Image: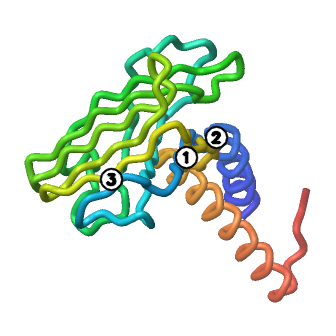
Amino acid sequence: MRSMTQLCVLSAIVAGAFTGPARADMIYTYTGNDFTGVTSPYTTSNYLSAVLDFSVALGPNYQYQRVYPVSFTLTSGVAGDAVTNNNGSAGIFVETDESGNIDGWYIGASSPVVPFTQTQHTLYDGAEFDYASYDNGSGSVEGAAGQWVTSVSAVPEPSSLIISVAALTGLWELRRRLSSAVRSGVALMA
């Protein structure tokens, strides 16, 4: 009994020591201003939005460097006009400030799945505009850059989850054995 208890405690400690931290993805979300120039199906209520998911934060002082997010979504709110890494492709270039925040960008995206082309430019070579086109219509806004917001999304590593479950199982077994020994009146020896 004593060796089993020691084994459970030792396995829980070892498993806990090797549990790695969760991976934290950096999510960059862009929200543009309402379009001012539109042709159907776009309206002046539509605007450009983008979500770029990177496994690490962007570095400081990029000068329109091409970047490769883990995943991306670009849309302007018209049904069918969303381009993602699952249904299209994109050339994504960013400029960052000294803190790694996006302060200039260019994305050219297209999708073979739907008749859609989406190109966005903001603060690129002095121009500030968002543009999207879909199904012979288009939406755009000039001279009014949107806003980028950065957030962190924790993504647990699969190996960490397995090791954590093993550690918890070891602790559960220890608790079960100790409870059983106490109920049966067995004195535990050190």
Residue assigned mark 3 = 139
* Side of 165 relative to 69 (left or right): right
SS label for mark 1: helix
Residue 178 occupies which quadrant of the picture? bottom right
| Identity, as a three-letter code, of the amino acid under mark 2 | Pro
Disc number lying in front (3 or 2)? 3
Q: Residues within 10 Å of mark 3 (few under 14, many from 20)?
A: many
According to the picture, the residue beneath numbered tag 1 turns out to be 160
| Residue 146 picture location, percent across and down | 56, 44
Spatial separation of the CA atoms under disc 1 and disc 3: 46 Å
Q: Residues within 10 Å of mark 2 (few under 14, many from 20)?
A: few
Circles 1 and 3: CB distance less than 8 Å?
Answer: no
Q: Classify residue 36 by image quadrant.
A: bottom left
Looking at the image, is mark 1 or mark 2 earlier in the sequence?
A: 2
Amino acid type at circle 3 is Gly
Foreground: disc 1 or disc 2: 2
Q: Which residue is mark 2?
A: 21
Q: Residues within 10 Å of mark 1 (few under 14, many from 20)?
A: some
Q: Circles 3 and 2: CB distance less than 8 Å?
A: no
Q: How many marks?
A: 3
Instruction: Give left or right: position of 182 versus 148.
Output: right
